[in-house]
Image (cartoon, rainbow, N blue to C red):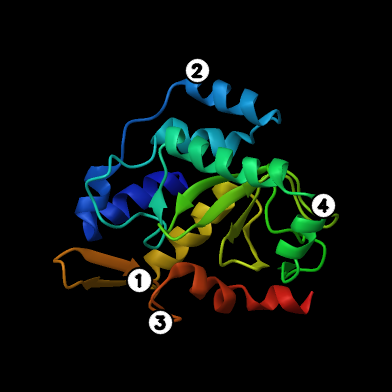
């Protein structure tokens, strides 16, 4: 049986060849260990497996495999994580309270209702300050290693998978069932998003795809 990553690779090769070709070889165990040591918290195996398969993208394609979100190389993931960590460490309690004023967890108690958390590890990026990432410091009803949306514009946090593996399986199930929208843009490159709901940004689609979490 193929893994979710192998299924994703097959789908990309058939539908978004430029993204499939842009996937980098896997990163080293030393690079993973260094990042893990910096964070000071064990990484889930499914996050490590993601980077063992591919160290993000090489930067030639103008879209990414996660419904258009770019797959960050581990060196870039570390830079983004460091920037968020700096915000956390240099913000006063009052400043962070103000920044977190509109932060909420769609599923009550699943994600801590803060603007930034140094234990959120980004692996996907929208070039606008927003991410998908692994949550190593969940709320009381959350799961360590859950995949969430977070960033500058992401006040409401959703759990899009209890692990990276779960998220990938969900996404590939969506793709294989036909839920994809690939369009040629003005610059000649191709964009990639969900067909249903029809949005311009996957992080906007999440609010519809996972709306049931608001009922829990």
- Tell me where residue 83 appears, x and y as whole percent: 56, 43
Q: Nearer the viewer, mark 3 or mark 4?
A: 4
The disc at residue 198 is 3
**Can residue 70 be seen by looking at this rendering?**
yes
**Can residue 112 be seen by looking at this rendering?**
no
Say which residue label 4 marks.
Answer: 93
Q: CA distance from mark 2 to mark 1?
A: 36 Å
- Tell me where residue 114 appears, x and y as whole percent: 74, 58
Residue 30, relative to residue 78: is it above or below? Answer: above
- CB-based contact (under 8 Å), mark 3 and mark 4: no
Which secondary structure lies at badge 1?
loop
Residue located 28% across and 39% down the image: 58
Q: CA distance from mark 3 to mark 1?
A: 9 Å
- CB-based contact (under 8 Å), mark 2 and mark 3: no
Q: CA distance from mark 4 to mark 1?
A: 42 Å
Q: CA distance from mark 3 to mark 4?
A: 39 Å
Q: Residues within 10 Å of mark 1 (few under 14, many from 20)?
A: some
Q: Residues within 10 Å of mark 4 (few under 14, many from 20)?
A: few
As rendered, which of 118 and 201 lies closer to the eye? 118
Q: Earlier in the sequence, mark 4 or mark 1?
A: 4
Q: Which residue lies most toward the left here?
A: 188
Say which residue label 1 marks.
Answer: 180
Say which residue label 2 marks.
Answer: 30
Residue located 72% across and 71% down the image: 102
As rendered, which of 8 and 58 lies closer to the eye? 58
């Amino acid at each position: 049986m193929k893994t979710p990553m192998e299924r994703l690779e097959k789908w990309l090769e058939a539908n978004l060849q430029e993204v499939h070709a842009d996937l980098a070889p896997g990163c080293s165990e030393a690079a993973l260990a260094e990042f893990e040591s910096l964070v000071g918290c064990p990484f889930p195996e499914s996050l490590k497996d993601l980077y063992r398969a591919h160290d993000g993208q090489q930067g030639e394609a103008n879209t990414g495999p996660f419904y258009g979100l770019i797959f960050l190389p581990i060196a870039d993931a570390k830079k983004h994580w460091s920037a968020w960590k700096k915000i956390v460490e240099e913000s006063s309690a009052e400043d962070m309270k103000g920044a977190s004023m509109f932060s909420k967890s769609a599923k009550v108690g699943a994600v801590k209702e803060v603007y930034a958390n140094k234990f959120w590890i980004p692996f996907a990026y929208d070039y606008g300050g927003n991410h998908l990432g692994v949550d190593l410091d969940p709320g009381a009803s959350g799961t360590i290693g859950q995949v969430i949306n977070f960033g500058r514009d992401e006040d409401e946090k959703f759990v899009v998978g209890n692990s990276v593996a779960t998220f990938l399986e969900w996404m590939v199930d969506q793709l294989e069932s036909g839920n994809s929208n690939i369009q040629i843009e003005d610059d000649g490159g191709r964009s990639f998003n969900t067909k249903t709901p029809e949005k311009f940004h996957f992080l906007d689609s999440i609010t519809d795809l996972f709306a049931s979490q608001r009922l829990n």
